[in-house]
Every structure is written in structure tokens, then in C-alpha cells.
Image (cartoon, rainbow, N blue to C red):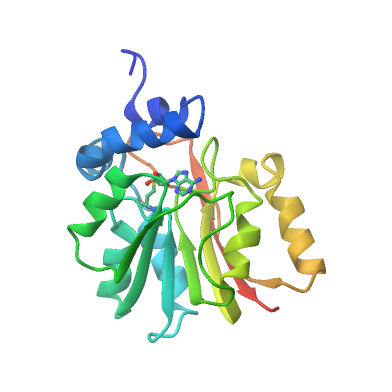
Amino acid sequence: MTEEQNVIQWVYASKNEQELQERYDEWAKTYESDLDRDFGWYGPLWAVEAGARYIPKDARILDAGAGTGLVGKLLTEAGYAEIVAMDLSEGMLAEARKKNVYSAYHQMTMGEPLDFPTDSFGAVVTVGVLTVGHAPAHSLDELVRVTRPGGHVIFTLRPDLYEEGGFKEKHAELESAGKWKLAEVGDPTQILPKGEPDVYHQVWVFEVTG
Ligand SMILES: C[S@@+](CC[C@H](N)C(=O)[O-])C[C@H]1O[C@@H](n2cnc3c(N)ncnc32)[C@H](O)[C@@H]1O
């Protein structure tokens, strides 16, 4: 990290997937305290609040890019009992394990084929992962494949990336293929208000239809 960079900019400046993984491995132990102290991080709370409007309590849920388990912890507090963690970084997954809220842990990469059967989850939640240098728009193909029809895919996304990152195109493609339909999209809101007030995100909820 350079003196001018904060830890988020340092992670975002990763040159490739290997470096991204190494930087998250290194950040894992202080991820939550850094976010709490310097940034504020509302992604998990918003996504779980939106998800709870759609996901039945007995659903098996995939937390894709689970990180240290903030989403899993909130889902558990909301009454969900079967949550599976998946992440690129073993270091982040090691922190997630300490929360004791997941039924399984998998090191996998969004953007590549996922080693889960088709229709194996009632919902997928992915927070802070479909973003610059992390997971690309085409990751959504696999998230939709592993979600059973009638289930939901819930994610946070920067409004500027919706167009520039290929998400608008992917949204239309999956819709015209009859694979999903929009259930709701939230207003753009500051997701890191203390440290990066210019960064806005929306929570998107899609119902998988085929
Ligand atoms: C900003 S953190 C968000 C973690 C957690 N969802 C939260 O809200 O606190 C991004 C997480 O995504 C993981 N990640 C980044 N790119 C990924 C990819 N292509 N596939 C799977 N996980 C990825 C990182 O290792 C990190 O744990």
C-alpha cells in the first residue's frame, strides 16, 4: 500500500486475480475493524434486508464472495439456517469460519464455472463482489444456473458499473433468455459513507425463472 492509498484502493489496484487473492488474504484479519473504523460498510445489511423480503426461511443460500462472513452472520440473525460460504480468498474464508454461521466453505472463483449442481440453492447473495477487478458480469450466468427456478439472486452493484461493466447487457440477455426477471432495484445509496462518500451502490433482486 502506498502512503496516498487507503486499503480499499490498494485492493482495487490489484493487477490480476492472483494479486487480488493475496491482498484479501493479507487484509482478512483486519477487514472488519478497518471497514468499521474508517469507512462504514452497509452492503451486507442492505442486501440481507432486501433478500429477507423474498427468501423463505428454509432456503439453502449461497453467500458468493462471503469474505469474513458479515452477510452470513446477518442472514443467521434473520432466521436463515443453511448458508454456504464461497470465496476466492482462503484467508477471508478462514475468518468466516470463526463466525460459525455457515454449513460449508468453498474456495471458488466467480467468473469461472462453479462446482455446484444446477438448481442447488434457493437463493444466492453476493455483496461487494460484482465490482471493478473482482467478479465480472458473466459471473451471473453461473449464479443463475445454481439457483433453482423461483429462487432469487441478490447483489450490490455500483450504478456506473451497471452500464460500463456489462451488467446492463447481461440483465437484458438473461431476461430475454427467460432465465430471470427483475423483482426490485434499490435507490443508489452511499455504501461506504465515512471513507468513500462518492461510492454509491444499488441492491438488485432478480427472480430466477428458468
Ligand atoms: C469487498 S469483499 C466483500 C465480502 C463480503 N461479501 C462482505 O460484504 O463483507 C469482496 C470479497 O469477494 C472476494 N472475491 C473477489 N473476487 C472474487 C471472485 N472472482 N470470486 C469469488 N470471490 C471473490 C474477495 O476475496 C472478498 O472476500
Q: Position of residue 129 (x, y in %)?
A: 48, 48
| Residue lying at 46% horizontally and 27% vertically, measured from the top left | 14
Q: Quadrant of residue 190?
A: top left
Of the 4 image quadrants, the one containing the C terminus is: bottom right
| Residue lying at 28% horizontally and 68% vertically, measured from the top left | 102
| 53 up-or-down from 127: above or below | below
| Residue lying at 24% horizontally and 44% vertically, measured from the top left | 36
Of the 4 image quadrants, the one containing the N terminus is: top left
> From this viewpoint, which residue is outermost toward the right?
176
In-image side of 50 versus 170 (left or right):
left
| 167 up-or-down from 151: above or below | above
Q: Position of residue 95 (x, y in %)?
A: 22, 50
Question: Along the line of sight, which residue is nearer the eye, 178 or 181?
Answer: 178
In-image side of 197 versus 153 (left or right):
left
Q: In this orientation, does residue 187 appear? A: yes
Question: Along the line of sight, which residue is nearer the eye, 169 or 22?
Answer: 22
| 68 up-or-down from 49: above or below | above
> From this viewpoint, which residue is outermost toward the top?
3
Q: Position of residue 194 (x, y in %)?
A: 32, 38
The image shows a total of numbered marks equal to 0
Q: In this orientation, does residue 184 appear? A: no
In-image side of 61 versus 103 (left or right):
right
Q: Position of residue 82 (x, y in %)?
A: 34, 77
| 163 up-or-down from 117: above or below | above
Question: Along the line of sight, which residue is nearer the eye, 69 or 190?
Answer: 69
